[in-house]
Amino acid sequence: MRTRTTLSKLNCLIITLGYFSIGGIWILFSNTLFTLLSNRQPVVPQFIEMSHWLFLGLSSSLLYFLLQHWDSLQPKSDQPLQKLNVEMKNFRDYSAAAVKAGDGLALMQEACQLCVEAGGHRMAWIASAEQDKNKTLKQTTNYGNVGCFFDNFDATWENNDKGRCPAGTSIRIGESIIYQDLLNNSRFKHRREAAKRCGFGSCISIPLRDEFNITGALIIFNAKTYAFDSEQVKLLEEIAGYISTGITNIRKDKEHTLAGNEHLMLAAITEQTAEGVITFNTDGIIQYVNPSFIELCQLPLNKIIGISIHEFQCSKNNPKFYQAILAAIKANRPKAGHFITRNGNGDEHDIDVKIAPVFDASNRVIQYITTIRNSTKEMQLQRYLQQTQKLEALAALSGAIIHAFKKQLVTISTNSQEGLSASNDNASFQEKFLSIFKATQNGHKLVEQFTAINQQNEPPKQLIDIADIINKCVVALRTNLPSTIKINKHIGSDLGMIKANNKQIHQLIMNLSTNALDAMLPTGGVLEISLFNLDSSNGNCQSQEGFPKKFLKLTITDTGQGMDRNELNYIFDPFYTTKGQGEWQGLGLSIAHGIVKNHGGKISANSILGAGTSFVILLPQEETVETCEAKSEARGQMALA
């Protein structure tokens, strides 16, 4: 500061000395110059030359004084305007920092303080135009308030007496309003007494706006009347512009941040949801799929993203699903349905699908989104329950019929035996009675099969090793096995025991395996029989109420001709068969279902036409604590050996 003052004084001295030097040269040589030009003798009285030098000295001193004190001699009324101009640069920097920090209130407070302290005004405040039914004006912030103006403050931006104040009027018409003489302005009569108490003489109200609407106003009061000239108004409107821009940018940043957070949240939900999600644009190009869809579809990502929905492999494998997509695109309306789909591995699934267009703000379709829920397990459970209900209904209906039928068979069988004994001499009669007797024997077997389905007479159960039964069944099956069919057996380690009837479990495995072998004739194939713990990660016994409890998973799979979904729905029904008429009674799978149910287990089937069929049986383990400990001890001895 001292250097700047010294430099200013030096500049003033240099200007003064320059002025004095030029004036001196003029005094010394002006007479000579005029004498030469006029061809006359110089006549210069001594007193005239001295007066010239005196005038030059006095004018130089006055010039130095004027230059030195120029700033202090400017009109006092220009000082607030200059100060406000200087402070505007700092406010620009502050407004940028406030926008970056997202602090809109701090920006408005700083603007009000700037108007009062740098602009020389009495008070500044910012009104918010509320969007309520009364169009209320709300004070957001103020600076310089003397504590009286906002007492019992009640104003609106409605077109009424309360709304004809500067703030309400500028918000309503969207222009700056200046009241140069508040106390004599009829439009300010509603707040005239408050202005008089606070010492306000004039005011200006400048609207604040965003891209679409006027959101409020900056109102500034000055103690003097006619305090707002054109330069003042221009600067104050610039401040209001910074406020409007800053608040708009802060709001946009918050909206973008909120939208970004919502987008991230939705993206996380979409990534984690069990439902498959796939989106494609209006040209049918797939843009996004979530992990659940990839798992369901069983295709690598590079064979999905960027592929046309019309060329998509899962679309080609599932024509009904594809037709639903086309219908949604054509109608531009949501479509929903249940479909049976085949993935990249050829496995079939039940899926519930919703296809919907996505519209932009102008109601134009920009993309389509498809959600796919894998309902295979639900449908399997539903089919299992339906099958169980049908068999229970059959049991209830057939119980009495079986009992009465057995009585009739006993009567027929007894009479046929007596007829055989009485017709020794008549070969023709003997043959007829023998035929009757054989028919009654077949009837007895049919009754036993129905009894197995209905489980009216529950056979005794004991702890058995199902792996041993599987080994015996495989040996029996291989006895008459054609060379075109191969049997593979996979039995896990540390398998538990099950409480079951040995004969029924043997019948269960043989029925399912025989059906599988028949399905592979005459072309041949592979029969897979596997047995594992449901959770085979360890062989530890898990006790519940003193007894271990877990499941064994028995799977019997063939590579035969398979079945379609319609056939799969009826395979456990009594007398239903996929074989020709007269080839089979159609009770094998019904009996298998009854055996599994009688042992507290579950049986399900999955089949692909032309690829094969797989039966999965879950049987509960009921291994005693002693057996578990014996197995653990045996494993320990083997490890030591």
Image (cartoon, grey):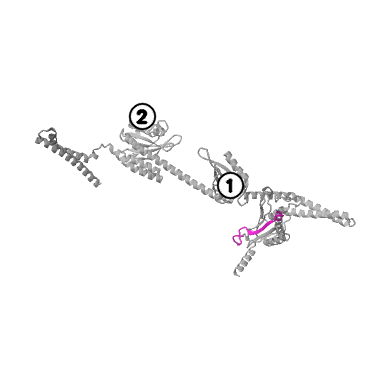
86 left or right, relative to 366 = left
Q: In the image shown, does 282 or 424 lie closer to the viewer?
A: 282
Q: Name above or below for residue 160 compared with residue 514.
A: above
Q: Position of residue 281 (x, y in %)?
A: 54, 43
Residue 244 in view (yes/no): yes
Q: In the image shown, does 54 or 384 lie closer to the viewer?
A: 54
Foreground tag (2 vs 1): 1
Question: Secondary structure beneath disc 2?
Answer: helix
Q: Residue furthest top?
A: 186
Q: Position of residue 375 (x, y in %)?
A: 61, 48
Q: Which stretch did the figure color magenta?
A: 516-543
In the picture, which quadrant includes the C terminus? bottom right
Q: In the image shown, does 218 or 159 lie closer to the viewer?
A: 218
| Quadrant of residue 588 within the rendered picture | bottom right
The amino acid type, in three-letter code, at marker 1 is: Phe
Residue 54 in view (yes/no): no
Question: Secondary structure beneath disc 1?
Answer: loop
Q: Position of residue 614 (x, y in %)?
A: 66, 54
Q: Name above or below for residue 582 compared with residue 171.
A: below
Q: Name above or below for residue 126 compared with residue 571.
A: above
Structural crowding at the residue carrying mark 1, measured as other residues with C-alpha within 10 Å and reported as few (<14), some (14–19) or many (≥20): some
Q: Are marks 2 and 1 in contact (CB under 8 Å)?
A: no
Q: Is residue 105 magenta?
A: no
Disc 2 versus disc 1: distance between alpha carbons? 76 Å
Q: Position of residue 179 (x, y in %)?
A: 34, 32
| Quadrant of residue 557 within the rendered picture | bottom right
The amino acid type, in three-letter code, at marker 2 is: Ser
Q: Is residue 529 magenta?
A: yes
What's the mark number on residue 186?
2
What's the mark number on residue 312?
1
Q: In the image shown, does 547 or 234 lie closer to the viewer?
A: 234
